[in-house]
Structure formats: structure tokens, C-alpha cells
Amino acid sequence: MPLVFPFDPNIARASTIPARLYNDPVYLELERERVFAHSWQLVGRVDQVLETGQYFTAEIGNDAIVILRDGTSLRGFYNICLHRAGPVAYGCGKRQTLQCKYHGWTYTLDGTLLRAPEMEGVENFRPNEMHLIPVLVATWGPFVFANLDGKAPPLLEVLEDIPRRVAPFRCEEMRYVLRKEWDLACNWKVYVDNYLEGYHLPVVHPGLHKELDYDQYAVEPHRYFSIQHAPLRPVHGSTRNRRYDPNETDVAEAVYVWLFPNVMMNVYMGQMQTNVVLPLAHDRTKVIFEWFATDVPENPAADAKWSRLLEFSDEIQAEDIEICEVVQRNLRSRVYDRGRYSAARENGVHHFHSLLHEFLT
Ligand code: FES
Ligand SMILES: [Fe+2]
């Protein structure tokens, strides 16, 4: 089976990508190298690394990394000791040096090897010339991004004018509220495909369909990202049965930003939710949601507004997970290989697949 696959840049002529891209583990290996290592990955928050020595660890595919604050510099390294690949950090915390949890080699915050016990007599061993392997780090608003292969275009270039477009929502002022995680039995691309269109709204999400103006729903593709505009339906009469009240907000729409390949940012009404989609295996995916808001309640779990919001989000997520897992099972069928796109509704999915095609082949 050839690894390359044909792809038509014209959506009206294109077929969707072949089912083997969702089923064959060989594509996940290729994606790890050519897509995930080569793009900006959302790995954490600036508020976790404000003071010198504060650090957090993260994983991008098979690669463990550590992000830390060293004075004015934010640094990132592979979390892999130069000795025999032990971890130089666990979890998160604050330390003035990084000490490997295996044989205790110690590194300064700039990654230089400071001490390696009992290495006397080893030839050509010069600790001060040995450094943890760096990864590129960049921030935007409250987010820390990392790029493994150091070859992604600068983050702000990739984001283009996203910062200006979400400015009315005041994302930069938002603070972290809470996090939720899901494990899904599907390929990561099934979840991303599903995210990138509003076409399934009427059938899969009847509750959400009542809130959003489906006719005005639009997807706007850019170079490395796309934006979905979902205006709230106008309220006629009472807002009692509405989850979102357009009168409560200056900007009566929800904006869904997707950054290739696996980051989503859903912004509406004084809050924002990020989704990070992480492949665990070719048919298993972890999805992490983090909420941010301008008004952060003491205890979100006990707050009536937040409980309602989380309950609605859980309902939509459950609907999406159910359909994604069935689709993954059907993609394994002996009869299905490729489908067609709705030119009116699936330009976001087609855009994702064309970027994937570009990065993979
Ligand atoms: S692996 Fe790190 S000190 Fe041995
Ligand atoms: Fe959905």
C-alpha cells in the first residue's frame, strides 16, 4: 500500500482522505514526525511558569519535554537525560536545577550539565559542553506552545491575525478555571474532522442547534488555521429555555478557532475553552479541555452558572464522542474507503485534509 494518497485541492471534485489514514498505525508514525513534531503544540500555560525555576512537563507524542522559567527566558528541553535517558523532571514544581531521577546528573536552568557524579576517568567527558536538547518555545496570551523540530514558522506568523480577531472577547485577560479529559476510541483525525464542520449540528446536537443560527454558520479557512463563526440565534420572547443568552453579551456569536493540527479555541461570552487532541494510538485519542474566564468563581463546581455550562458542554461532548467512535468502527469496514465533501458545509474539513496532505507527502 503506498503511503502517498491523491488529494484534490478543489473541494467540488475532491474525495475525502482514504480510510487507511485512520486505521493504519504507520500513518500515525508519519504524522508524529511530519505533522506533530513540525508544528506548534499547545503544552501549558504561562501562569505555571511565572517565577525562575518554575517548570512543568508535557508530552508531544513519544517525546517528553520540560518547560521552565529562567529569569526573563522561557526555555524548553526534551525531558531526557544525556546519560541513559532518565527524566530530568516530573510533573510540575519549582527548582533551581534539574536533577535526573535516575543517577542524579544535574543540569542548570539553561540546560547545561552542572554535575555528573563519579564520572572521573571518563575520556572526552566535558560536562560544561553538554546541554539538554532544546525545543522551541513561544507564548501567546495565557498559552505556552512548543515546537519539537525547531522548524515551524514563528508562532505569531502562524497565528496571523487571530489575536486581533479574538480581541473583542478579551482572551488575554482570562484566567484558568478548570480542566477535563476524555479518552476516545477513535483516530485523532476523526475528532478533528468532526470539530471542523457545523454540518452535523442539526442531527447530532439538537440542543446546540437551538442556540446557534445554523443558516449563518460559516467556516473561514486560512493558511494554518480556520475560524468557524456561529452566531447565536436571536431570542424571541423569554430566554428561560436558552443555554446562551445573546442579551448577556456584547458579541453575540461563538467563535471556534482551530490551529493545525490539533488545537481548538472556543470563545464566547467572557469565557474560552481550549481543546487539545492528542493521539495515543492510531485508534485512541485523548482530548483535553481547559476553561478560562474573565470572572473566575471561587469554586467552579459549586457555582450555578458554571455547573450549567459544564453540563451543557458534557452533553455536546458525549454526542460528539458517540458519533466519532461509531465512525471509527465504520472506517475499518471492508467496504468504505473515501467519501465526498459538502462544498457548502465542509470546507473546514477539506482545508484540514489539504494541510495534512501537504505535511505528509
Ligand atoms: S539517566 Fe540521568 S543520570 Fe543516569
Ligand atoms: Fe459536534
Image: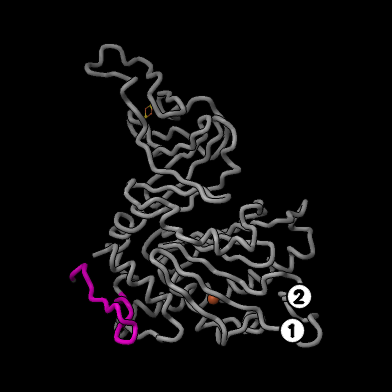
Q: Nearer the viewer, residue 24 or 130?
A: 130
- Residue furthest out toward the top: 121
- Please name the residue shown 56% across and 34% down the image: 54
Question: Disc number at residue 62?
Answer: none
**Mark 1 residue crowding within 10 angstroms, few (<14) / some (14–19) / many (20+):** few
User: Percent position (x, y) of residue 195?
Assistant: 49, 72
Q: Does the magenta stretch include residue 228?
A: no
The yes-or-no answer for disc 1 within 8 Å of ligand 2 is no
The yes-or-no answer for disc 2 within 8 Å of ligand 2 is no
**In terms of sequence position, does the residue under pointer 1 or pointer 2 come before the other?**
1
- Prevailing SS of the magenta stretch: loop
Q: In this view, does 354 lie above or below 272?
A: below
User: Percent position (x, y) of residue 53?
Assistant: 54, 30
Q: In this picture, which residue range is highlighted in magenta?
A: 2-19
| Ligand 2, image quadrant it occupies | bottom right
Which amino acid, mark 2?
Asn
User: Percent position (x, y) of residue 161?
Assistant: 49, 61
| Horizontal side of residue 44 vs 361, given as left or right | right
User: Percent position (x, y) of residue 41?
Assistant: 44, 53
- Please name the residue shown 58% across and 63% down the image: 166
Give residue 312's quadrant in the image.
Answer: bottom right
Give residue 339's quadrant in the image.
Answer: bottom left
Is the Cβ of the residue at disc 1 closer than 8 Å to that at disc 2?
A: yes
SS at circle 1: loop
Q: What residue would you read off at disc 2?
A: 247
Q: What residue would you read off at disc 1?
A: 235
- Please name the residue shown 36% across and 47% down the image: 148
Which amino acid, mark 1?
Val
Q: In which quarter of the image is the N terminus?
A: bottom left
SS at circle 2: helix
Q: Which of 165 and 71 is in front in this view?
A: 165
- Please name the residue shown 63% across and 81% down the image: 212
